[in-house]
Image (spheres, helix red, strand yellow):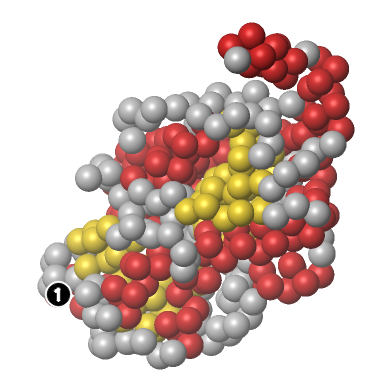
Amino acid sequence: MKPILTAVAALALCPAFEASAQATYPARPLRLVLSVPPGGAADFTGRVVGAKLSELFGQHVVIESRPGAGGIVASEYLTKATPDGYTLMLTSSTTHGVAPVLYKKLPYDAMKSFTHISGVLYMPAMMAVNAEVAAKTVKEFIALAKAKPNGYLFVSSGNGSAPQLWGEQFKILTGVQITHVPYKGSGPAVVGLAGGEAHLMFDGLPSLIGQLKAGRLRPLAALHDKRFSVFPDVPTIAEAGVPGMEGGIWYGLSGPAGMPPAIVERLAKEMLRVLRQSDVQERFATVGGIPMEIGPKEYTDFIRKEHRKWGEIVRVSGAAPN
């Protein structure tokens, strides 16, 4: 048996065999790893993308959630996968924007341990409060929080997440003292906020929109230079009196380091096709999402730029993962 296994391994390393495998890619189902549980913006984005890639490839794209530790669990899992294009990950502002600058030691390198393939979606964030909070505007919430230091709680999708750092940035820009409460994913965090376990959250609109429309949450501001078309009466954060806080959640497609260039090129090309489909753009638009039509080099450069931005926020705020 051992000589047979050795021969199979040697065949897999043969250039002709590798070229043939790339030419027939994908020949079996793919896995798309998410760093959060179902119910949030990442889950929404991953399922839209997964369904479309499945149509284009003629292969199932299995969504696999591996939440925990600000995306570190999913990221480490991906770096240990075979770099053959069959295990991919929806990388994000949390996993590859915030975590690399917030955590002093990671079991991987956010750039060298990955093959960054394509941008997917940029999603401006929303500031929302529990509907029982007395504030109807950002200025009113600031006044309430200043009158009761550390008496108000803000939730996030977890320690080391972008929503946590928006809360930290809000504290810096306004001088309020509010306390962070991490959850394991945006879905559970929004449920907790709607149930009265906390007062405030900053997150992408897909995570919040169900509870906003149900009236359990109240939108206070869009973290963007334009108002959301689905909430035209809600001001931008600058209009609400806190300029400099514009930002959003972003998602991209990545794989393990060492993926064959031909497969990377194929995936980037197909992702561009997905993002240009009218029904995909319409679905993203319902939550204020903007397709990120950028390829491997541009997405890699974008991540490096995000490191610099979030690194400065971490430095000034003194934010820590625990």
> Looking at the image, which is closer to me, 13 or 310?
13
Q: Is residue 86 visible?
A: yes
In the rendered image, the vertical position of residue 116 relative to residue 210, given as above or below: above
Left or right of 317: which side holds 94? right
Residue most toward the front? 1
Examine the image and state in which quarter residue 47 appears. Answer: bottom right
Q: Residue at x 39, y 84 (%)?
A: 218
The crowd level at tag 1 (other Cα within 10 Å; few <14, some 14-19, many 20+) is few
Left or right of 62: which side holds 34? left
Left or right of 38: which side holds 8? right
Mark 1 highlights which residue? 147
Q: Secondary structure at mark 1?
A: helix
Residue most toward the top? 3
Q: Residue 265, how many percent across, how many down?
A: 80, 36
Q: Residue at x 80, y 29 (%)?
A: 21
> Looking at the image, which is closer to me, 13 or 158?
13
> Looking at the image, which is closer to me, 51 or 16?
16
Q: Residue at x 77, y 42 (%)?
A: 26
Left or right of 311: which side holds 290? right
Question: Where is the N terminus found, in terms of image quarters?
Answer: top right
Q: Residue 310, how many percent across, how many down?
A: 43, 43
Q: Is residue 237 visible?
A: no
Question: Where is the C terminus found, in terms of image quarters?
Answer: top left
Please state the total of marks drawn on the protein image: 1
Q: Residue 279, how many percent across, how many down?
A: 78, 72
Q: Residue 302, how many percent across, how many down?
A: 62, 40
Q: Residue at x 53, y 26 (%)?
A: 113
The amino acid type, in three-letter code, at marker 1 is: Ala
